Image: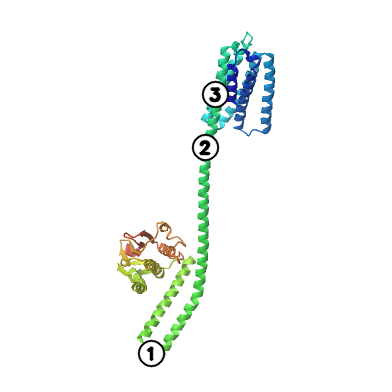
Amino acid sequence: MAIIGLTLFAIGTATTAEAMKSNSIVFTFANVFYLGSIATQLLFCVSLRKPVSKKSIYLFILGIVIFGIHFEYLRGSGNFVGRVLEVASIICILLVMQLYQLQKVLRVQSSLQLKFLFIFTLLELVTVILRLVVSALQVNPVLTIDSVPMSLMAVTWFNLSFNVLSYLTMLGFWSERSAAKQVEASIENARISALLDERERLIGSLLAANKSVATGALSASLAHELNQPIGASRINLFTLRRMLTGRDIHDDAIEEIISRIELDNQRSGDIVAALRSIFTQEGVITSCISTAEALNSVVRLVQGECIRLGIALEVHIDDALINANRVELQQVFLNLLNNAIDALKTNQQTEQKSIWLRCMKHSDSVQVLISDNGPGISEQLAPRIFDLFETSKKAGMGLGLWLSQYCIQRIDGEISYAPRVGGGSEFVVDIPLKRDIAQ
């Protein structure tokens, strides 16, 4: 509105002597638009504190129309000074109201653009007051555009210029607020995205927890059900041994087979008992164990499979004594060795397939390294390899490594994974030495 008013005022001042009779109506439009621009500024300042009602907008439009009709009436009567005094007085009132609103807004929020708007509004008020003073001191009647005092023209142009600057400042304020809102929206979007990611993680954790509970219940059920046939097989083996003893049959091969069945049966029972203690949160029962004995027993279990698949198994064991649960520890190393065998079994490679088992004794701990030259574990899966239900196998359940880590941590040990230099995987298990030995 300020720019339109300024344009119309320029058109009016470009006319010559007949401006008062023919083209002077252009001044009416110029003043209407100028007054409208001041009123719009006031509404803008009010909107910074509270929403502007429709009633206020309708009153604003009605007031501008009434002013235009009255101004045109004054123009027809030829009262130039009266018109100037009326316009200047109304604008003074509007500008004072605008400064009052801006002062309240600036107490609440600090904005450089609003400070500039306050300054330009104050300068507008000063120039309008000067218009009032110059018009009041005007003695000679103004009949043509040439008879308008230059001082009044200069003050009017300065006044309109400050009005235009006020609008440019308002535009800068809206641009500043728009940019701030965009930044806030970006931050809010990032926060919402983080919350959604957190929700997905929580859902995943809940699903894993549900699976863990289901797995625990299943394991407890299996332990309960398997104990019966295992107990029955023990009775049957005992009966068979009594029968063979009663008949004085001493076949070494049969004796060896029976002994192996007894050992496997005992081992099955121990595994079930270990599973029961793990999933029922019972305390771990430890004893003094020889690392050489525990590892060699596991090596004997996988040696046949390695020979059948053409896998070279290199073993180096430093004997040491540790406090651990024998069955759980054997299951950990058996799981790691079986994982290495599975990785090499499906891997098509020209070089010799190899597994290395090394046990090294340190001052306060024993370190067991199990490595292979298979395909290794992907970088994406490696950080989550010990998480429950995470697996790199197509038919895997994702329980083995999680359970291995749980068993090792129960005896204050640590287990970690790292890619093997030269290709493949390497798992490192650190277990504290038996306390009196370490001391």
Category of crowding for the residue at label 1, using alpha-carbon neighbours closer than 10 angstroms: few (below 14), some (14–19), many (at least 20): few
- In this view of the protein, can residue 118 be seen by the observer? no
Badge 3 or badge 2: first in the primary sequence: 3
How many numbered marks, from 0 up? 3
Helix, strand or loop under label 1: loop
Horizontal and vertical percent for residue 353? Answer: 33, 67
Task: Say what amino acid the circle numbered 2 marks.
Answer: Ala
The residue tagged 2 is: 180
In the rendered image, which residue does mark 3 sit on? 120
Instruction: Give the residue type at disc 3.
Output: Phe
Q: Is residue 414 left or right of residue 52?
A: left
Taking the image as shown, residue 114 lies to the left or right of residue 354, namely right
Quadrant housing residue 26: top right
How far, Cα to Cα, is label 3 from label 2?
A: 24 Å
Q: Position of residue 424 (x, y in %)?
A: 35, 62
Q: Which of the 4 image quarters holds residue 322?
A: bottom left
Q: Is residue 247 visible?
A: yes
Residue 127, label in figure: none
* Three-letter amino acid code at the position of disc 1: Ile
* Residue 111 picture location, percent across and down: 52, 31
Which residue lies under the disc numbered 1? 249
Cα separation, mark 1 vs mark 3, equals 119 Å
Q: Position of residue 169 (x, y in %)?
A: 54, 28
185 w.r.t. 255: above or below: above
In the displayed structure image, the side of residue 306 where residue 149 appears, left or right: right
Q: SS at mark 3?
A: helix
Q: Closer to the camera, 206 or 174?
A: 174
